[in-house]
Amino acid sequence: MISQLFILSPRGDVIIKKEFRYDVPKTAPEIFFRAVKFWKDGEKAPAVFSEDGVNYLHIKAGGLFVTATTRKNVSASHVLELLHRVAGVVKDYCGVMNEDALRKNSILTYELLDEMLDYGYAQSTSTESLKVHVFNEPATPASDGAGHSLVSGKAAGGKKSRGTYGVFSSAIAAAAGAAGGG
């Protein structure tokens, strides 16, 4: 179904790139970023467009471009939903969807993509069903600048929260407590 899936920073740097069919040029991320950055008449680029016979489908999640490419005639809504689910699963596992978290958890992200997509076809995109197949633990992102861990699992006031990344919050909180001595 899809030929490539890549995640770009707001500057156009490739953070994650996964090839499935090898029928799209390796320069597709650069072509995509230039097309989006310099879209016609200064307008915002549409979620789906075609350049030189390659279809580009993208969403923005956490300020990052989550993009799929294909030469095939695919259902745009299906691929866009897949991209939303990929971004959601990565956020569930990493705690946040940003450049720093993806760079620190690149191995985990590639493992998730391997389990979610097989030769460009969607397999399992549920966080719950992936727990059995994914063995890497997320790396703890940096603090928010105020000395609070971004994945401590505690909401304002010190109460435990049940966010989407609650799967790992207790393990990360325990590790953070052991490292911080508190």
Image (tube, grey):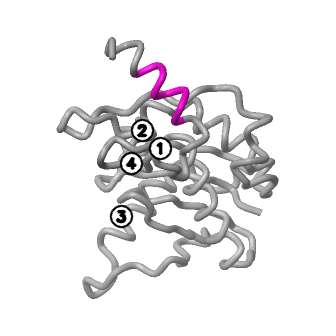
Q: Main secondary structure of the magenta part?
A: helix
Q: Nearer the viewer, residue 122 or 172?
A: 172
Q: Which dot marks residue 34?
A: 3
**Label 4, label 3: how many angstroms apart (C-alpha)?**
21 Å
Label 1: which secondary element: loop
Q: Nearer the viewer, residue 175 or 104?
A: 175
What amino acid does circle 2 point to?
Val
Quadrant in which the N terminus appears: bottom right
Query: Is residue 84 shown above or below 11?
Result: below
Quadrant in which the C terminus appears: top left
Q: Position of residue 130 (x, y in %)?
A: 75, 43
Marked residue nearer the N-terminal end (4 or 3): 3
Marked residue nearer the N-terminal end (1 or 3): 3
Left or right: residue 109 compared with residue 7: right
Contact (Cβ within 8 Å) of mark 4 with mark 1? no
**Residue 179 image-quadrant placement:** top left
**Label 2, label 1: how many angstroms apart (C-alpha)?**
6 Å
Residue located 69% across and 49% down the image: 127
What amino acid does circle 3 point to?
Arg
Q: Position of residue 124 (x, y in %)?
A: 79, 52
**Label 1, label 3: how many angstroms apart (C-alpha)?**
30 Å
Left or right: residue 29 compared with residue 89: left
Label 4 sits on residue: 98
**Disc 4 versus disc 3: nearer the observer:** 4
Label 1 sits on residue: 95
Which region of the structure is painted magenta? 169-176
